[in-house]
Image: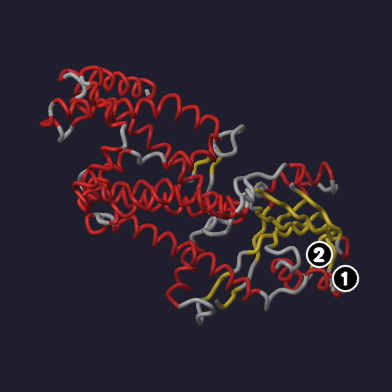
Amino acid sequence: VMLIWFFVLTVSGIVHISKNSAVYAALNPYYAYRFFEVHGFGSLFILGAVFLVVTGGEALYADIGHFGRTPIRLAWFTIVLPSLLLNYFGQGALLLKDASVAYNPFYHLSPSWALYPMVFLATMATVIASQAIISGVFSLTFQALQLGFIPRMKIEHTSEEERGQIYIPRVNWILFVVTASIVVGFQSSSNLAAAYGVAITTTMVITTLLAYFVMQGLWNWPRPLAVIVAVLFLLVDISFFGANMLKIFQGGWFPILAAGTVYLLMTTWFTGHEVLEKQMKDYVKPLKSFLEDLDMRTVTRVSGTAIYMTESPTTTPPAFVHNINHNKVVHKGVIFIYVGVKAVPHVRAEDRVKVAKLPKGCHMVLVRYGFMDRTDMRAVVRILQNNHLMFDLADTTFFVGRDTLIPSHSVGMSKWRDRLYLLMRRNSERATKYFNIPPDRAFEIGAQIKF
């Protein structure tokens, strides 16, 4: 369908270019300069409208995480970009010949009999193109989750071969509700254009600023070179950004409101998690000293292996403390697993797991994932059984902490943000599902904590 779509765009553009070759003069930048010189400040309104021809390209960067650079570059430079350029030049040639069709030049490129087939094809292409945005949202959500900026949620991996192909049901429903609301609220694509322009130009400016830090910190470019490259991009980005800022009150306020809401939720979750960790310090002790001071004569050693998920490799998991204090038991095999996320997309399987011995016959397992890797305790258990420790999964219990937070007084955040954090926490995915822990092997244990 997409190949047919771009073929039709190319052919319809070439047909009208051949009828009016004067449109090639648009390649001369003098006319752009002359336009701004004649129309002055009013040119910004036109620049804001013209910018809409480049929207959609920002989705390419989000989808690189799914498909890699080579397929994106190949599709863009060999099919998409040439087709779009030829079609826009065809529209320009048509307008030079007949300015009365300026209200909708695209559909006037085709004969009258082809109107309905073109509407149908355009609708199909739009539905397919929307998948690029949806996939990008899934990818960004997953990375934010791995970096600890949003609550855990259900993630379905839709491919055995491709790690990046995922589906997040909750995010998909949120997208549906928001998109339907926007369509009902704005009612037409022309009203939505202002919101779209503000969203994309802001994204472009932020991307350029982030690229500068990548040039400096990751690629180790000399600062003068990084500044020159960033400024060249910013000259273009800020020009479009300034032109679209004129549309703030025409619908441009919506993406700013949406971005502010997402930022508030992400920072609330991240800050709330830090506050909770400080609160939990009163309930936990250093793991090594806790094990050394543990009097095994006061507890019963039971058969089997216990695996405790811990949020820090140096502190005692509260679930382990609760099990000893209330049940007075310690399993013969005790494994503490800490899962950390590195600032790289993927960590190789052979580098993922490290095992260290602890007092009382216990072991600490450090598991490292990239921010695009799937957390999977079943796979970790297989690595441990094959390379490090001997134990039977059928005789193993995963102990997962699930503490209940009780609102009391604000600690580090305002009271309304405390309640927002608690609401997000209650609706987050259970650790057993997120870490892919066998449900028949999981045991949740926790306590009530004032927050």
Task: Name the spot of residue 405 as percent of width and height, x first.
Answer: 55, 72
Q: Do the residues labelled 1 and 2 touch (CB within 8 Å)?
A: yes
Q: Distance between the residues labelled 1 and 2?
A: 8 Å
Q: Quadrant of residue 133?
A: top left
How packed is label 1: few (under 14 Cα within 10 Å), some, or many (20 or more)?
some
How packed is label 2: few (under 14 Cα within 10 Å), some, or many (20 or more)?
some
- For disc 1, the marked residue is 296
**Eyeballing the image, is 278 above or below 90?**
below
Q: In this view, does 387 lie to the left or right of 344?
A: right
Instruction: Identify which residue, 248 or 172, lies in the foreground.
Output: 248
Instruction: Identify which residue, 111 or 102, lies in the foreground.
Output: 102
Q: What element carries label 1?
A: helix
**Eyeballing the image, is 179 above or below 430?**
above
Could you say which disc has been placed on residue 88 in the image? none
Could you say which disc has been placed on residue 330 in the image? 2
Quarter of the image containing the C terminus?
bottom right
Can residue 414 be spotted in the picture?
yes
Instruction: Identify which residue, 377 or 27, lies in the foreground.
Output: 27
Residue displayed at 47% across by 51% down: 208
Task: Name the spot of residue 448 as percent of width and height, x first.
Answer: 59, 74
